[in-house]
Image: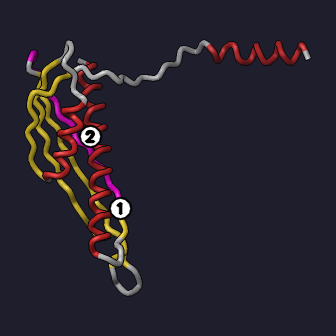
């Protein structure tokens, strides 16, 4: 019994102090001064709200952000009667941000894709489309926040 305990301790001890740490910065170090948007209004509204709510006012860098979004909807599946059963939506967002203090300018693009089913009632299909666009936009908004934070920490 004692040998098993010593063996377990010797196996776990090197793994305990490996120095691994999670690299996730949850504090935002920027303040959004102005957001200019072009493209799809609904997508831009969701992303703009995410940026406004999550900006900080304490010891931050002031940013000017420009967002250009595009939505593309294509037919993904048809049944044997040649009726559409699924659509695929792709949202592309190009973000350009400027740091006011040091005139640093950077840009990046984020793209997300999802699909939704066509229901028997047209209103249900529209609701499915709206839900899909909303979830993709919120995900893109989170990615924009993380990417801006990561790029500002690099400079």
Q: Are marks 1 and 2 in contact (CB under 8 Å)?
A: no
Instruction: Give me the residue at 28% from left, 60% from top.
Output: 89
Instruction: Give me the residue at 81% from left, 16% from top.
Output: 7
Report which residue position mark 1 lands on: 115
Q: Quadrant of the N terminus?
A: top right
Q: Is residue 15 left or right of residue 109?
A: right
In the picture shown, does residue 144 fall above or below 56? below
Instruction: Give me the residue at 35% from left, 24% from top.
Output: 26
Q: Which residues are magenta?
A: 101-115
Q: Which color mode does the image show?
A: secondary structure
Q: How many marks?
A: 2
Crowding near the residue tagged with mark 2, few <14, some 14–19, many ≥20 C-alpha atoms within 10 Å: many
Quarter-of-image position of residue 138: top left
Across and down, in percent, residue 64 comes to 10, 29
Residue 12 lies within the magenta run: no
Across and down, in percent, residue 99 comes to 12, 22
Across and down, in percent, residue 97 comes to 14, 31
* Towards the viewer: 88 or 14: 88
Assign a secondary structure to mark 2. Answer: helix
Across and down, in percent, residue 143 comes to 30, 37
Report which residue position mark 2 lands on: 141
Q: Quadrant of the C terminus?
A: top left
Q: Residue extending furthest bottom?
A: 81
Quarter-of-image position of residue 84: bottom left
In the picture shown, does residue 149 fall above or below 43? above
Q: Is residue 2 left or right of residue 144?
A: right
Mark 1 to mark 2 CA distance (whole Å): 19 Å
Nearer-N-terminus badge (1/2):
1
Crowding near the residue tagged with mark 1, few <14, some 14–19, many ≥20 C-alpha atoms within 10 Å: some
Instruction: Give me the residue at 8% from left, 31% from top.
Output: 34
- Dominant SS of magenta comes to strand
């Amino acid at each position: 019994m004692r040998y098993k305990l010593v063996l377990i301790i010797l196996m776990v001890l090197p793994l305990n102090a490996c120095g691994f740490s999670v690299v996730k910065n949850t504090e935002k170090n920027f303040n959004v001064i102005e957001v200019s948007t072009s493209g799809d209004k609904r997508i831009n509204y969701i992303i703009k709200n995410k940026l406004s709510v999550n900006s900080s006012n304490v010891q931050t860098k002031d940013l000017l952000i420009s967002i250009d979004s595009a939505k593309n909807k294509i037919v993904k599946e048809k049944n044997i009667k040649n009726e559409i059963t699924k659509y695929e939506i792709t949202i592309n967002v190009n973000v350009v941000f400027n740091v006011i203090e040091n005139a640093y300018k950077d840009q990046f693009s984020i793209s997300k894709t999802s699909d939704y089913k066509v229901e028997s009632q047209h209103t249900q299909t529209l609701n499915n489309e709206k839900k899909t666009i909303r979830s993709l936009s919120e995900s893109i908004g989170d990615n924009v926040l993380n990417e801006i934070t990561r790029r500002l920490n690099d400079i």
